[in-house]
Image (spheres, helix red, strand yellow):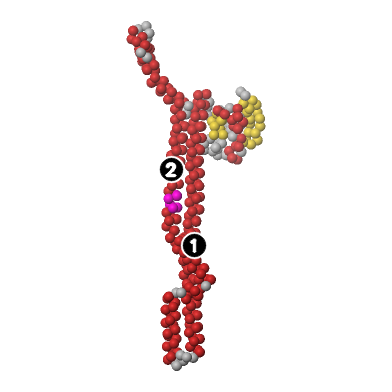
Amino acid sequence: MGAVSDFVSDFDPTTTDGLANLATGGLSGALSGPIDQLGGFIEGDLLGGNAADAAEEAARLQAEAGRNALQLNRDQFDQTRGDLSPFREFGTAGISNLQGAIKDPSARVLNNPFFTALAEQQEQRTLASAAARGKVGSGGTGDDLQRNLLLLGNQFAQQDISNLQNQVNTGLGAATQTGAFGQQSAASQGGILGNIANAQASGQIGAANAQQQGISNILGIGALAFSDIRLKENVKFSHVENGIRLYNWDWNEAAKGIVGNQKTSGPIAQELKKTHPELVFTDPETGFYKVAI
């Protein structure tokens, strides 16, 4: 009481000092601090401003973490795609050659300098063998040369096609890996974007609920109870109280593990929301409606 009496005496208009303090605006200055503190308490604590700010800040941090994860995912995909790019290009380059080898194998074989050298060596050996037997000019020697050339050419053609198929398969494998990783990355990015959206939505819901709870504090409202029609069955009208329709019901399967031991009488949240929206809140964890009781 001493502090209060001292404060009052400082602004007593019947005294010279008190009159001077009032004249110079000392009272407003002395009251500005307590008024500011009171305003901060009302806005921050009583009206739920601090809780709302905390919910929004938590959502912002979650969204920021999600965006960082999204960027890391995109960077990883770009790096993997770049690492596989040479193999895809290598395989792509072999496609046209493989088509040519299958369509006209003799053209690639005859234009192969290695085949030409081997064919000449094979011809020289055949002629040397025929000369040793004195059959260089015989018809059999010509047949042998033709047969050996066809066998050698077929071997080259088959080996050429096999090599080109391996080249194309290398590119196909790299392209398949790129596509599969791209699908995984897209699914992952979709999940991350969904988490970001959920975090932002939860922050907004949490902030709104905090502010509504602050209002309910001002109005002297007590606890919040689930009263969502989606959690009820066997709903029966009871009576009207203070202009609010009240019902009796049973909790359904969806309510198990959510409502606990809450009573089975009261308003329907969806109906109450139309007439008294300030008494209806969204539970941030389940998304179901609660009412102030």
Q: Mark 2 points at which residue?
A: 65
Q: Which mark is residue 172?
A: 1
Compared to 83, does 31 lie above or below? above
What's the residue type where badge 1 is placed?
Leu
Identity of the residue furthest to the top in this view: 14
What's the residue type where badge 2 is placed?
Ala
Q: Is mark 2 on a helix, strand or loop?
A: helix
Q: Distance between the residues labelled 1 and 2?
A: 36 Å
Q: In which quarter of the image is the C terminus?
A: top right
Q: Quadrant of the N terminus?
A: top left
**Of 236 and 85, which appears nearest the observer?**
85
Q: Is mark 1 on a helix, strand or loop?
A: helix
In the rendering, at what x and y percent does residue 28 appear?
Answer: 39, 16
State which quadrant residue 237 falls in: top right
> Which residue appears at 45% of the width and 50% of the height?
74
Count all numbered tags in the image, as a single digit: 2
> Which residue appears at 48% of the width and 51% of the height?
185
**Of 24 and 221, which appears nearest the observer?**
24
**Of 60 and 42, which appears nearest the observer?**
60
Which region shows up in magenta?
Answer: 73-78
Q: Is residue 11 left or right of residue 205?
A: left
In the rendering, at what x and y percent does residue 54 appear?
Answer: 44, 34
